[in-house]
Amino acid sequence: MEKGYPKLLKPILQQQEFNFNPLETIASIGRTSTYTTSSTNISDALDLTCILKAAQTISSCIELDALISSLTRIILENSGAKTCVLILPQEDTWQVRAITFIDQQSNSQTDVKTILESQLLDTCQDIPRKLINYVKNTRETVIIDNCKTNIPGVIGEYMLQHQPQSVLCTPIINQGHLLGILYLENQLNQGVFTSNRLQVINLLSSQAAIALENARLYQQAGQALQDLQQAQLQIVQSEKMSALGNLVAGVAHEMNNPLGFIAASLKQAKPTFTDVIEHLKLYEQKFPTPGDEILTHAEEIDLEYSLEDFPKMIDSMIIACDRLKNISTSLRTFSRADRDYKVPFNIHEGIDSTILILKHRLKANDSRPAIEIVTEYSKLPQVECFPGQLNQVFMNILANAIDALDESNIGRTFEDIKANLNRITITTFLKEKQVEVKIADNGQGMSESVKQKVFDHLFTTKSVGKGTGLGLAIAQSIVVEKHGGTLDVNSTPGVGAEFVITLPILV
């Protein structure tokens, strides 16, 4: 452009009052350079614009993988290299995080490809490990042409085998801390990494150092947030189970004492009353004319009916005691304290005990008939699990199903609901080495956007004060992390929702 159109470019060049090299000026901000030049031309200004855009692209990346991919591509495009490798520290090891290279295709077209696979530096065969370790230890930039250098010990097996014509290896440093290493090579041409290009690489490396540090801090912050959310879920889960377990266990315990006394008394009362009846019959046989007073009293108390009905009353009370005993057993099953290790557990007992706890919410009320519970149980083996936590999963899903059904009833009449009863269907299967539990309702279902976020921490579709957004997140944590299973949801708007729990069985 300068040679072909000097008159057009002359006004632009005249505006530059001072002779300066923009690459050198900016590069000096990131790293001192001994290279100087007095040339001032429009190509430098164009190069400066491209470099500033590249630096801006690097600084805009905050996700580590995206930053690594973008960084290696930008440096490859602005350095004259054919291959760019980024090595980063990971805890106590150094890993090759990205290899970006120019792929020469058969139709003479070129394509830039990036391999984002972590490899240990000590075992990677695609780089000169001796050279990289030298730069890691000395923190010096090394440039090698035609595999010739005065530095002892850096020409290793890789260099001798591949014979790269131009090699550059430079550290990425921020505030005195070594954050990474860049390795560049060109196997075809010598002298590729000139002083001018080195300034560009230094500038981009300085920007990369800041971006890598920001990405690392962002990653740590994300991990800290995830750990905090997980801790919150565990605390809430522990508190809920502790409070509910203590309440239910306390109720069951308090029921057992009077219940045991009543049941024992009834068992003794029935034969005793039978003896009294037989004694009265003997009196009737020995004294066939008891007198007017006795006859009048027998008529007043309807003695014949009482003698016939009282045994039935005792039998009914014994049945009621048995029912209360079963309820107490179910309460203890639901609230059983988990140990530090998994124990065999009957899934159906856990589901039934949970349904019993929620029975008061299933009953009919003024606005709707009773919610129908349909159980379709297959024959299942015992599952090795934490029973108390698993019962909490059933509780959360069933309680949400009841809430969904109540919400779907808004605006419907009692007769309309009665014609299409609210229903929760619980189905169990045995599939290979897993137990599958499906809990489905015929409510309104959920949209695709809600379905994608239904297990997210603090996400809820309920109104303020009715939901915390933790129930299903806790349930998924229990199933997936504690038991190695899965928790998924299927839903069709207007049809209902189905939660599917899979758990490994006891082998």
Image (tube, rainbow, N blue to C red):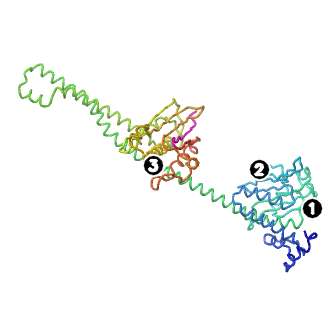
Q: Which residue corresponds to the image point at 41% horizontal and 42% vertical from the top-left?
A: 358
Along the viewing direction, whichever of 464 and 42 lies nearer the viewer? 42
The three-letter code of the residue at mark 3 reads: Ser
Can the viewer see residue 331? Answer: no
C-alpha span from label 1 to label 3: 72 Å
What is the chief secondary structure element of the magenta stretch?
strand
Look at the image and give the residue range highlighted in magenta.
494-506
Q: In this view, does 434 lie to the left or right of 45?
A: left
Tell me, yes or no, whether the two marked residues, 1 and 2, touch with CB atoms within 8 Å: no
Label drawn at residue 238:
none
Residue that carries the numbered disc 3 in the rendered image: 242
Does dot 3 land on a helix, a strand or a loop? Answer: helix
Residue that carries the numbered disc 1 in the rendered image: 191
Does dot 1 land on a helix, a strand or a loop? Answer: loop
Along the viewing direction, whichever of 2 and 169 lies nearer the viewer? 2
- Reading the chain from its start, which is encountered first: label 1 or label 3? 1
Can the viewer see residue 248? Answer: yes
Residue that carries the numbered disc 2 in the rendered image: 119
The three-letter code of the residue at mark 1 reads: Gly
Residue 227 lies, in percent from the top left, at: 59, 54
The three-letter code of the residue at mark 2 reads: Gln
Query: Can you say which quadrant of the picture contains the N terminus?
Result: bottom right
C-alpha span from label 2 to label 3: 46 Å
Q: Crowding near pointer 2: few (<14 within 10 Å), some, many (20+)?
A: some
Mark toward the viewer: 1 or 3: 1
Does dot 2 land on a helix, a strand or a loop? Answer: strand
Residue 503 lies, in percent from the top left, at: 56, 38
